[in-house]
Amino acid sequence: DLGNLNQLVRNELSALSASIQLLLQTNPSLSEQRQWTIIEEDYEHLHHLMTMYENYRNNFHVKNTYIDVVNICEKIAFEFQSLASEKHIDFLFENKMTHPQLLHHYFGDAEKIEDSVIGLLKQAFFTIPGVTYVKFSLHNTVSPNAIIHVEWNGTMIAETDLQDLKQAQISKYLYAKYKEIITAKQIADICNFDFSISSSEERTYVDLGIPTYEKANV
């Protein structure tokens, strides 16, 4: 319920921000008025408080323990295999970890990692039109870190949407359209993971970069 309320408040803040910008574009002289400055300061203060609240709430709910990320991903892949067959989607899971010990004994939040991966797969399986191929993989980076990688074909994500997805404020329309991607990004922020997304006519790619160097018990 708090999560829903939080998103409702963010939607209202986005609408308020758009109204403020529209008014300022229509009446540039407003920026010279003291009362207008107070309104802008009040908005910024409210946005700051909202961000602080989210950070406190999210950090409070992080439950880090030693977990097996490889095993988690393998179980998720197994669960989606039958669904892929039903939907006639070519689904591929690959474990390309050259240093799997980095993820076999990882200090992190199992539930949040599960939610982010399942969410990205749900986005591909249920939301993106025309998907016939989904790839889910694990691999190392040049540094001793790991990447959870999900890619799919189908309708590409518009560049304007990609840019908006990177903003702190998400519109109600964008949230409804890319809820699972936004959730994965929020989880990445909570867990201090890197998050990247790109989209072309051939594929959409999402990477969750897991910082294993300091956390892993190798």
Image (spheres, grey):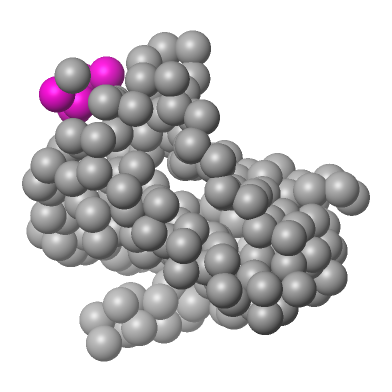
Q: Residue furthest right?
A: 201
Q: Is residue 176 above or below residue 164?
A: below
Image point 35% across, 83% down: which residue?
4
Residue 37 on image: x %, y %: 46, 58
Left or right: residue 151 compared with residue 49: right
Residue 161 on image: x %, y %: 72, 58
Q: Nearer the viewer, residue 157 or 115?
A: 115
The secondary structure making up most of the magenta span is loop
Image point 66% across, 58% down: which residue?
91
Q: Nearer the viewer, residue 53 or 97?
A: 97
Residue 190 on image: x %, y %: 29, 49
Residue 179 on image: x %, y %: 54, 71
Q: Is residue 204 above or below residue 45?
A: above
Q: What residue range appears in magenta?
A: 213-217
Of the 4 image quadrants, the one containing the C terminus is top left
Query: Is residue 186 among what the camera can see?
Result: no
Left or right: residue 16 compared with residue 104: right
Image point 27% across, 26% down: which residue?
101
Left or right: residue 184 compared with residue 216: right
Image point 16% across, 55% down: which residue?
62
Of the 4 image quadrants, the one containing the N terminus is bottom left
Q: Nearer the viewer, residue 213 or 48?
A: 213
